[in-house]
Image (cartoon, coloured by chain):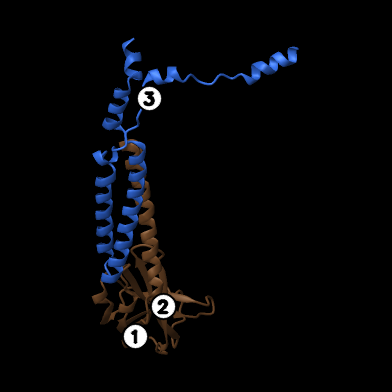
Chain colours: A brown, B blue
Amino acid sequence: MHSFGYRANALLTFAVTALAFICAIASFSDKFSNQNPSAEIQILNINRFKKQSHGNDEVSLTLDIAADLQSLFTWNTKQIFVFVAAEYETPKNSLNQVSLWDAIIPVKENAKFRIQISNKYRFIDQGHNLRGKEFNLTLHWHVMPKTGKMFADKIVMSGYSLPDAYR
Amino acid sequence: MSVKNVRSDPSSVKLGFTRFEMDWQGQKLVEQLMQILLVISGVVAVVVGYATESFRTMMLIYAGGVVLTTLITVPNWPFYNLHHLKWLDPSEAEKHPKPQVVVASSKKKFSKK
């Protein structure tokens, strides 16, 4: 600590180490937050349901998505990525996931929302298994903290089904 | 000749310490001050940031603490140099010569006998 350079170096080292501790504490404090997210999705209309010329089923539908993810926001949350996926089983694949809609929620105020929207991304099956198919709509979210580990969770809503015939 | 004089002149050593280097007590004080100030600013930042639920506030408080600590501990302030090393006059060394190593030589004499 005898010279200017040594003191500056020691200060920088100690300050950055302490900063790492502060970030670790901030990340750790997230574990004590109460999380009770809720979501509800309704299918308002099947707009289109057809077999494409090369044989894959395609569905267009209008969704009513209502969710309250405000409890996921803590002081250490940067943003939340949320998406709705249709999940179903086919003889070939035990789990098919098709993303229908997504959004990035940057602030807590926007985390409670309700929108009515037709699917943002096309709902296409790899094949033609969708007639009369029972499927789940799952709301997935990825919480991106300012410091610490990113984590993901989901709410599965079941009991949706597609019509028995193309239209 | 002149170079030799400057090196052994106690006043020039003292001048060197005040200009460029802290004395020993100052170095101990500056290290403790640095650690204490940074830890305090970190604790305050976390507590206030958590209480106000603002990560930004926490970072600003800590950054302020680091800047303050830098201003206090990095420059060589005069109050770190209150305990100058008091060098003995060269004549003192002549009055008290280094103890000679006598054991080895006496042993040699012993073995020769």
Residue toward you, A122 or A10: A10
Q: Which mark is residue B88?
A: 3
Q: Nearer the viewer, mark 3 or mark 2?
A: 3
In the picture, the disc for residue A134 is none
Percent coordinates x, y for residue A49 in the rendering: 36, 83
Whole-number angstrom distance, CA of label 3 to CA of label 1: 88 Å
Q: Nearer the viewer, mark 3 or mark 1?
A: 3
Residue at point 54% right, 76% down? A92
Viewer-proximal residue among A74 and A85: A74
- As shown in the figure, which amino acid type bears the numbered disc 1? Ile
Confirm whether circles 3 and 1 share one chain: no
Residue B97 position in % (x across, y down): 48, 19
Find numbered disc 1 in the image and state the secondary structure of the residue it sits on: strand
Q: Residue furthest top?
A: B1
Splitting the image into 4 quarters, where does residue B60 fall? Answer: bottom left
Q: Chain of mark 3?
A: B
* Pick the front one: A9 or A162: A9
The local secondary structure at tag 3 comes to: loop
> Which mark sits nearer the N-terminus, 1 or 2?
1
Specify the label residue A41 is tagged with: 1
Q: How many marks?
A: 3
Label 1 in the same subunit as label 2:
yes
Q: Is residue B30 visible?
A: yes
Image quadrant for the C terminus of chain A?
bottom left
In this view of the protein, which residue sits in the foreground, A46 or B109? Answer: B109
Check disc 2 and give the amino acid type: Lys
3D distance between C-alphas at marks 1 and 2: 13 Å
Q: Which residue is mark 2?
A: A154
Specify the quadrant that holds the N terminus of chain A: top left
Categorize mark 1 by other alpha carbons within 10 Å: few (<14), some (14-19), many (20+). Answer: many
Residue A52 visible, this angle: no
Residue type at tag 3? Leu
